[in-house]
Amino acid sequence: MSQYQDNIAHGEHAHEGGMDKKAIWRVFGVLLALTCLEFLIALGFVHHWQILAKGALVNTIYIVLTLVKAYYIVAFFMHLKFEKSSFIVTVGIVFIFIIYFIVLMLVEGGHLASVFQEHQLFPNK
């Protein structure tokens, strides 16, 4: 019976580097605040009060807020913050390559769209 108690005690303290309930609620609060800020910008500042106009500034704000939310989700809920640095670098390099390939596809797609519009087989209507 003593060995069972030792295993339970060890299991309770095995994740000391992880998150406790207070940290989970804090991350939840940050994510909730960021989401509310996005809705306030989208529905309030852009559409209702028309303080901000749709364009590059609003898109940049959305991208920055989304990247901050993605960081919190990946770092805390996927436990990447508590991993070894080599694993973090590996995941980061893969993420950079994925973004690089997406940008390449968007650039190539824009080039092909302009070429097809000027071609005789695809007349511009």
Image (tube, rainbow, N blue to C red):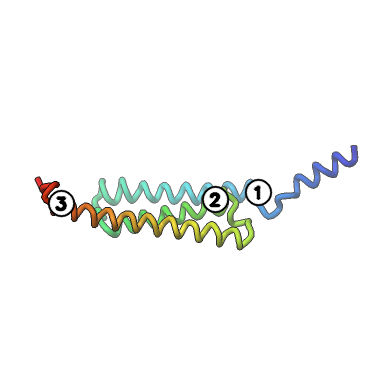
Q: Nearer the viewer, mark 3 or mark 2?
A: 3
**Is 59 situated left or right of 119 in this image?**
right
The residue positioned 64% from the left and 60% from the top of the image is: 84
Q: Earlier in the sequence, mark 3 or mark 2?
A: 2
SS class, disc 3: helix
| Place of residue 101 in the rendered image (x, y in percent of width and height, measured from the top left) | 39, 56
Classify mark 1: helix, strand or loop.
loop
Q: Earlier in the sequence, mark 1 or mark 3?
A: 1
The answer for how far apart the CA atoms under marks 3 and 2 are is: 48 Å
Q: In the picture, residue 53 is in which quadrant?
A: bottom left
The residue where tag 1 is placed is 20
Residue 1 against residue 110 in the figure, above or below? above
Three-letter residue code for mark 3: Gln
Q: Which residue is under mark 3? A: 117
Q: Which mark is residue 27?
A: 2
- Report the front residue among 86 and 16: 86
